Image (cartoon, grey):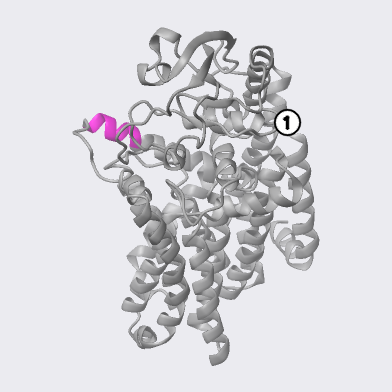
Amino acid sequence: MFEKLLTCIERYLVPVLTGIFVLRVAYLFINGLDLIGDESYYWDWSRRPDWCYYSKPPMVAWLIAIFTGLGGDYTAVVRLPAVVLGMVCLGYLYATAKAFYSSQAAALALLLILAMPFNVLANFVMTIDPPLYCFWMMSLYYLHGALFGQDKNQRLRSWFWAGVATAAAMLSKQVALLIPVMLVCFLLLDQRRRPLFKREFLLYLLPVLLSLVPIVLWNQQHDWVMFSHSKGHFGIKEAVALSTRLEQAGAFLLYQLLLASPVIFVLILVMAYQAGRRFTRLSAEEQLLMLMGPVLLIGILVLSLVQKVQGNWSMPFYFSALILLSGRWLAGERKNALKIGVVMGYLMVMLTYALPVTIQTFNLHNTPVDPTFRFRHWGELAASIETVREKTVPDTEGTLLIALGHRFLASQLAFYLPGHPRVYRYEGSGQIVSQYEVWGGPEDAIGKNAFIVAEQTVAELPAPLTSVFVHFYEVGTVVNPMDKRKSYHLFLGEHLKVWPTAQQAPLGGG
């Protein structure tokens, strides 16, 4: 039965992928979930295209700008690039697994990736991850052709396109730097291919280096804020108890079990351990797969014992791991266990898709069992704030909008308030903790009024903000729909004297 399913995927690949694409697009338009904070934040970036941003390279903003420029600033349109990139990624995954092994292994790799719950999110939420996954997969495909192709001219073309794909991955997320690093490791370990450093590797490296030029120049002009932010993710900042480290590592491990599905994740770890023990006896192709996936996965598991690691950092490492797992399955390894893993994975995937309806049906909003809380209530909050704004602000278009607190409040109000207005963020510390501080305050705003949204009362607001207006007073409150025990306080500042500034310095943030 399992083999027949793989044969069916091989035979009807295009209809299968087309059907998946249609279902994902339909789900995109009917799910009813708001953008999460990261999505609206990157959408706000997309309104000001640049060569780089505070915490990430520019690819996510460029892609959102292209799609919203064509389809408008709507929730589904912001997310549409994730679906398109996801389908391209699936196509390249199939092609890559077929190149490494066979069409049956490719069908199995496709079946496995679709059985992993993280793939649901990667094809629904438009963050930096969908472009990274797509271009990472493309890099692996072209690297196979460059290293193992039969025709010399084709190999040279593959080196170039591998470099272009890796450059696009570098423009998506900093972790893509691991692709050329692991490629260097492979070439150093494979004595027969070390001569490739003289010409072919340089052809690959050229697009990668060119992609770094605008990022470096932008950071040089902005006090290296992206590099400071990235550096803040690594290293031990203070003494942490062993129990805390174990708790953090356990949380990361739990994320892997949930995002990759338990059986498939365990099978990948077992395969990585066994293949690692006989690494030198593996074929060159399987060594490349090991270096591009399982080795990195083991590395980040070890890193989680030393510091806090985000659950999604490991996701691109699963692609080559799944291809290698598919190849080992064809060789007769763990056939029954893999079938169990596929069944369990698809049950988890169906549950993931059904979560919004389930939460709605059983009225589980904002309960401990509601994992969709990040996707809800932002539109509702913006509507409540807009009601107060219309009543208290005579000139909404000429009045500044200022948000205090987390950067997500500013970006979500910018997206969900009517007309998608420009929202400024006031950072009382004077430090750069988001892209809003990089952009700075409004120009030519002296004498204007400002509508301010904050979680603090007027007495709790920073004096440097309240004192720059001739008059400053509260005009209303709205209940925080995500936590009804709290409220947002709304203020009107009349006649801005000067935009409040402070000595700014880079600090970790988003």
Q: Quarter of the image for the C terminus: give it.
A: top left
Q: Is residue 267 above or below residue 446?
A: below
Q: In which quarter of the image is residue 417?
A: top right
Left or right? Give the position of 204 relative to 32. Answer: left
Residue drawn at 48 percent across, 12 percent down: 472
The residue lying toward the viewer, choosing from 306 and 179, is 179
Queried whether the magenta region covers residue 247, the answer comes back as: yes
Residue drawn at 33 percent across, 64 percent down: 277
Q: Position of residue 96 (x, y in %)?
A: 59, 70
Left or right? Give the position of 73 relative to 138. Answer: right
Q: Name the residue under label 1.
A: 32
Q: Position of residue 213 (x, y in %)?
A: 42, 66
Specify few, some or many for label 1: CA neighbours under 10 Å numbering under 14, 14-19, or 20 or more.
some
The residue most toward the left is 239
Q: In this view, does 223 lie above or below 209?
A: above
Queried whether the magenta region covers residue 169, the answer comes back as: no
Secondary element at tag 1: loop
Left or right? Give the position of 281 relative to 40. Answer: left
Please state the extent of the stretch shown in magenta in the rendering.
Answer: 242-248
Q: Where is residue 20 in the image (x, y as percent from the top left)?
A: 75, 52
Residue drawn at 34 percent across, 71 percent down: 185
